[in-house]
């Protein structure tokens, strides 16, 4: 059997990010069972990308235009094709997929975008938020109906909430992204000690500081919260993703009134060093305005070692993890400031969320268990 797992704009350096991590892990598991599985990348933002191999998985470049993609899949004789169907794809003409001869299964990488979140993102950053607004306003059952008309049989939601939004035009399945062995790896405290943080109380932001991830919003929230919590400390552990732009973030940082409450660390850390940072933190702040792909694995990593999260409400992701998350009451800077302040001053609440995090992740499936669910759909 030959399986193609389609994704969009995967290129070297992005393999561990969502949603790419999901299709790569599934392809690995399929290959271990003797199934010839390739990751098929349709490029939009990236260009001049060639085929390459990542951890034994062929990353093959394929067309994005649906009719050409279908011809390419037919020519390469795939037996099963997994298609990344965002809700806004339901606004498009999908007839080009009809000529694809193999079994066709969709998955929803981005989840459900709440209208309030998308509206706020557009209010802050204009047309940058257009794709999330389209996600928010598109009728959620439309994509499954259109895919059924072009021969798809099943659709996978990566959270239970997302799956329920898809309707009943296709067979629906909820399969969460898996957890890895982060909770079991050894910690390397060298970078924590280098910055003398091992005995300090601090919030941790980790990741790229792009607009949708809320890094700029967090800087503004810190300036507000210092008035009532002068001892608050936030460490920004900035991940240098391929294509990341830091200009807006550092412009915002330079305009802050309370820079002394912020520590910015821009170093490349391995998993052992990242675990040490999370373990040392009072909580991890992940103020996604909208979530690009369900569920960001940083949530899983922190919560698997009992570190609670501070976050805005974000549909399926935060619904699933809510027992381990301090969720801001509303999508505003004041809402985030209030959540940070309440948790900072309430160790009992922090410990309750810590226990909730451990409880959730103790039951969460591994990548191997998740892969078995995807493989079952091949039958």
Image: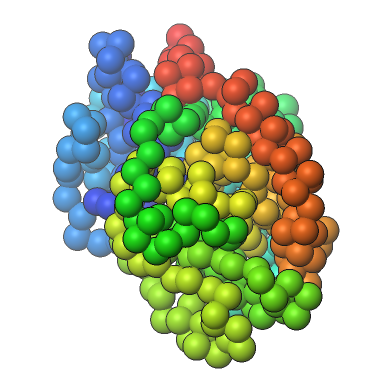
- Residue 262 percent location from the top left of the image: 53, 73
Quadrant containing the C terminus is top left
Please name whichever residue, 212 or 80, is drawn nearer the observer in this view of the structure.
212
What residue sits 43% from the left and 33% below the top?
A: 182
Quarter where residue 323 is shown: top right
Please name whichever residue, 198 or 48, is drawn nearer the observer in this view of the structure.
198
What residue sits 78% from the left and 45% below the top?
A: 349
Q: Is residue 184 left or right of residue 115?
A: left
- Residue 303 percent location from the top left of the image: 59, 38
What residue sits 54% from the left and 35% below the top?
A: 305
Rendered view: 222 above or below 91: below
Q: Is residue 64 left or right of residue 336?
A: left
The residue lying furthest to the right in this view is: 329
Please name whichever residue, 114 or 288, is drawn nearer the observer in this view of the structure.
288
Residue 25 at least partly seen: yes
Rendered view: 260 above or below 279: below
Residue 315 at least partly seen: no
Quarter where residue 319 is shown: top right
Quarter where residue 345 is shown: bottom right
- Residue 100 percent location from the top left of the image: 39, 31
The residue lying furthest to the front in this view is: 199
Q: How is the image coloured?
A: rainbow
- Residue 187 percent location from the top left of the image: 38, 39
Q: Is residue 358 left or right of residue 369?
A: right
Quadrant containing the N terminus is top left
Q: How many marks?
A: 0
């Amino acid at each position: 059997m030959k399986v193609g797992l389609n994704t969009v704009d995967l290129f070297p350096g992005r393999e561990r990010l969502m949603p790419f991590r999901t299709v790569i892990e599934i392809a690995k598991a399929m290959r271990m069972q003797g199934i010839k599985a390739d990751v098929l990348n349709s490029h939009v933002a990236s260009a001049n990308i060639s085929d390459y191999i990542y951890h034994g998985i062929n990353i093959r470049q394929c067309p994005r235009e649906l009719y050409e993609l279908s011809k390419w899949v037919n020519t390469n004789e795939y037996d099963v094709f997994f298609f990344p169907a965002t809700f806004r794809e339901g606004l498009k003409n999908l007839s080009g997929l009809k000529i694809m001869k193999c079994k066709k299964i969709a998955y929803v990488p981005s989840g459900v975008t709440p209208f309030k979140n998308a509206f706020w993102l557009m209010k802050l950053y204009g047309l940058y938020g257009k794709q999330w607004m389209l996600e928010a306003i598109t009728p959620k059952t439309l994509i499954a109906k259109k895919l059924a008309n072009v021969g798809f049989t099943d659709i996978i939601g990566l959270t239970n909430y997302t799956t329920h939004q898809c309707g009943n035009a296709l067979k629906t399945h909820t399969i969460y992204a898996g957890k890895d062995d982060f909770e079991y790896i050894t910690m390397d405290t060298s970078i924590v000690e280098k910055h003398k943080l091992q005995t300090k109380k601090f919030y941790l932001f980790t990741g790229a500081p792009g607009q949708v991830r809320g890094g700029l919003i967090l800087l503004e929230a810190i300036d507000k919260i210092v008035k009532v919590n002068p001892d608050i400390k936030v460490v920004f552990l900035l991940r240098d993703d391929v294509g990341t732009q830091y200009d807006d973030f550092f412009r915002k940082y330079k305009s802050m009134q309370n820079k002394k409450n912020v520590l910015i660390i821009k170093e490349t850390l391995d998993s052992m060093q990242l675990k040490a940072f999370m373990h040392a933190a009072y909580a991890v702040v992940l103020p996604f305005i909208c979530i690009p792909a369900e569920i960001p694995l940083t949530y899983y990593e922190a919560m698997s070692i009992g570190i609670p999260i501070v976050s805005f409400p974000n549909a399926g992701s935060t619904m699933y993890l809510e027992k381990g998350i301090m969720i801001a009451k509303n999508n505003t800077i004041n809402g985030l400031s209030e959540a940070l302040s309440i948790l900072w001053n309430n160790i009992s609440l922090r410990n309750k969320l810590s226990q909730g995090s451990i409880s959730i992740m103790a039951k969460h499936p591994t990548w191997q268990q998740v892969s078995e669910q995807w493989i079952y759909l091949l039958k």
